[in-house]
Image (spheres, grey):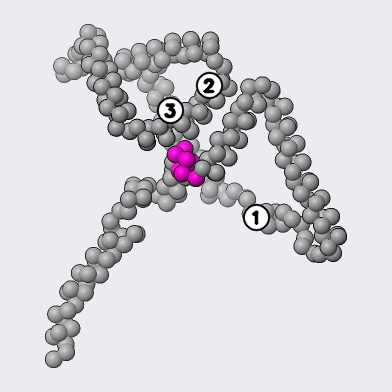
Amino acid sequence: MAEPSAATQSPSVSSSSSVAESSAPGGGGGSPGACPALGAKSCGSSCAVHDLIFWRDVKKTGFVFGTTLIVLLSLAAFSVISVVSYLILALLSVTISFRVYKSVIQAVQKSEEGHPFKAYLDVDITLSSEAFHNYVNAAMVHINRALKLIIRLFLVEDLVDSLKLAVFMWLMTYVGAVFNGITLLILAELLIFSVPVVYEKYKIRIDHHVGIVRSQTKSVVEQIQAKLPGIAKKKAE
C-alpha cells in the first residue's frame, strides 16, 4: 500500500525540485546582477570595469583615478623618459627601504621570517602559449574588424559614412590646434570617471534630451540622403 502513495507523490516532488533548480542562482533563471550572453572571464572583466567607472568601490576607483591622473599630468609637464624613470625610482625606493627595514627588524629581534616579498616572488607569472594565442586571436578579431571599417570608409562604400568621417576629421583639426594628445587623454579620463555616474543619477532626463537630438539628427540625415543621387536610387531599389 505504501508504493502507490510514493508513486503519487513523486510528480510533485520532481516538479518542486525542477522549480527550485530553475530559481537557483546558477540555474535557468537569470539573476539580476548576472551578465547575460557572456562567458565567465568576459563577464568578470566587464563587470570589474563597470564597477570601477561607476565608483562602486570608492577606495579602489579613487586609487586608479588618482594614479592615472598623476601620471598623465606628469607626462604633460615632463618627458616620457623622465616620468618612467621617476616612477621606477619611487617604486625602488619603497621596496628597498622596506627590505632594509625588515632586515634590521629581523636582526634586532633575531627572528627568521625570511624575505619580506617571498610570497610575491613565488607567484607564477609566466604566460602559457595557450593564453598567448587566445589573446592574439582576440586581438586579431578587432584588428580585422578595424581594417574592414577603414577600407569601407576610405573606398566610399557608403557616401554618408565617408562624409561623416570627413566632417569629424575636419573638426578634429580645430581640436588639435587647441589641445595636444596628453590634454585629450586627461579630459577623456575625467569624462570616463564622471559621465557614467552623472548619467546613472539623471538617466531619465538625459535619455529624454538625447532622444530629441537623435530624432532631429535622423530627420536631417534623411533629408541629405534624399538629395544625394546615388543613395536615393539605392532606397528606391
Can I make out residue 103 in this image? Answer: yes
Q: CA distance from mark 2 to mark 3?
A: 22 Å
Q: Secondary structure at mark 3?
A: helix
Please name which of the two marks, 2 or 1, marks the residue nearer to the observer.
2
Residue lying at 53% horizontally and 49% vertically, measured from the top left: 130
Q: Secondary structure at mark 2?
A: helix
Q: Which residue is mark 2?
A: 184
Pick the front one: 179 or 149: 179
Q: Earlier in the sequence, mark 2 or mark 3?
A: 3
Bin the neighbour count of mark 3 within 10 Å (Cα to Cα): few under 14, some 14-19, many 20 and up: few
Please name which of the two marks, 2 or 3, marks the residue nearer to the observer.
2
Image: 215 above or below 116: above
The x, y position of residue 196, in whole percent, is 41, 34
* Dot 2 and dot 1 residues touching (CB under 8 Å): no
Is residue 191 shown left or right of residue 110?
Answer: left
Q: CA distance from mark 2 to mark 1?
A: 37 Å
Q: CA distance from mark 1 to mark 3?
A: 37 Å
Is residue 81 shown left or right of residue 204?
Answer: right
Residue lying at 69% horizontally and 29% vertically, measured from the top left: 83
The x, y position of residue 144, in whole percent, is 43, 31
**Residues rendered magenta in the picture:** 51-57
Residue 114: give its label. none
Pick the front one: 19 or 109: 109
Bin the neighbour count of mark 1 within 10 Å (Cα to Cα): few under 14, some 14-19, many 20 and up: few
Q: Earlier in the sequence, mark 1 or mark 3?
A: 1
Q: Which residue is mark 3?
A: 146
Is residue 165 shown left or right of residue 72?
Answer: left
- Residue 45 colored magenta? no
Q: Which residue is mark 1?
A: 123
